[in-house]
Amino acid sequence: MPRIISGTARGTRLAAPRGDKTRPTADRVKEALFSILQSDWPADGFLDLFAGTGQIGLEAASRGAGRVVLVEKDQNCLLIIRENSHRAHLETQVRLLGQDAARALAGLSERFDVIFADPPYRLVQAVCDRLGSELARLLAPGGRLIIEHDSRDPAPSFVTNLQLERCCQYGTAMLSFYRRAPDGAS
């Protein structure tokens, strides 16, 4: 069962949908993710795409991210995210968009310091191909995009201004970190 690891909601156990519809990020992967992001924390804006249980975005809110947006289209997952945000007492710190990622991104205008995307592993490259320019548009200068994908697959490629910084493997999961150059940097 996933849980919040740190911050104001530390230790809160989170619900997850039954069955194999979601693949909650393992606690050790989540802990490593936020450890790597520590030098850039707190994030002013955090976007969690394909949010599933909402645990990554809720972890960000618990750790003090200024603005957290979670995007998930599955109705059962939306109910779970609402339940989890209530359990963690983070309802007022997060905004939930119950829609397809492409539609949600097109409707957003604010920029984010961190964007985390955990699409179904079989769709990672297709999602990056389809959403790459929108992700780059919404990422603040100097911001980071993190994609969780199958460790057997290469880091997704982008035709954007995002540069692959590093890839970190945790069992069958891989986190690929991309950074947008600060404005004025070449």
Image (spheres, rainbow, N blue to C red):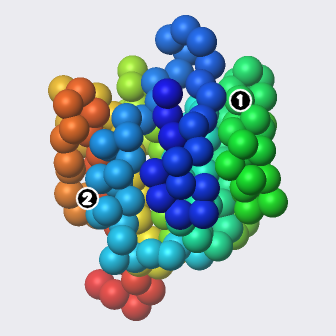
Whether tag 2 and tag 1 are in contact, CB under 8 A, the answer is: no
Q: Name the amino acid, label 2.
A: Leu
Residue occupying the point 77% across, 23% down? 75
Residue position for label 2: 164
Which class describes the residues within 10 Å of circle 2: few (<14), some (14-19), or many (20+)?
some
N-terminal of the pair, mark 2 or mark 1, is 1
Please give left or right for residue 103 compared with residue 30 in the image: right
* Residue 134 seen: no
Q: Foreground: 59 or 131?
A: 59
Which class describes the residues within 10 Å of circle 1: few (<14), some (14-19), or many (20+)?
some
Please give left or right for residue 80 compared with residue 25 in the image: right
Q: Name the amino acid, label 1.
A: Ile
Residue occupying the point 55% across, 15% down? 21
Q: Foreground: 169 or 9?
A: 9
Instruction: Indicate whether 181 appears above or below 46.
Output: below
Please give left or right for residue 41 compared with residue 8 in the image: left
Q: Foreground: 40 or 147?
A: 40
* Residue 142 seen: yes
Residue occupying the point 59% across, 75% down? 44
Label 2 sits on a secondary structure element that is: strand
Residue position for label 1: 80
Task: Give the foreground label among 2 and 1.
Answer: 1
- The residues tagged by marks 2 and 1 sit, at their Cα atoms, a distance apart of 32 Å
The disc at residue 16 is none
Residue occupying the point 59% across, 25% down? 16
Please give left or right for residue 159 compared with residue 92 in the image: left
Residue 60, x across and y down, in percent: 54, 59
Residue 158, x across and y down, in percent: 35, 50
Quadrant of image for the C terminus: bottom left
Residue 133, x across and y down, in percent: 51, 54
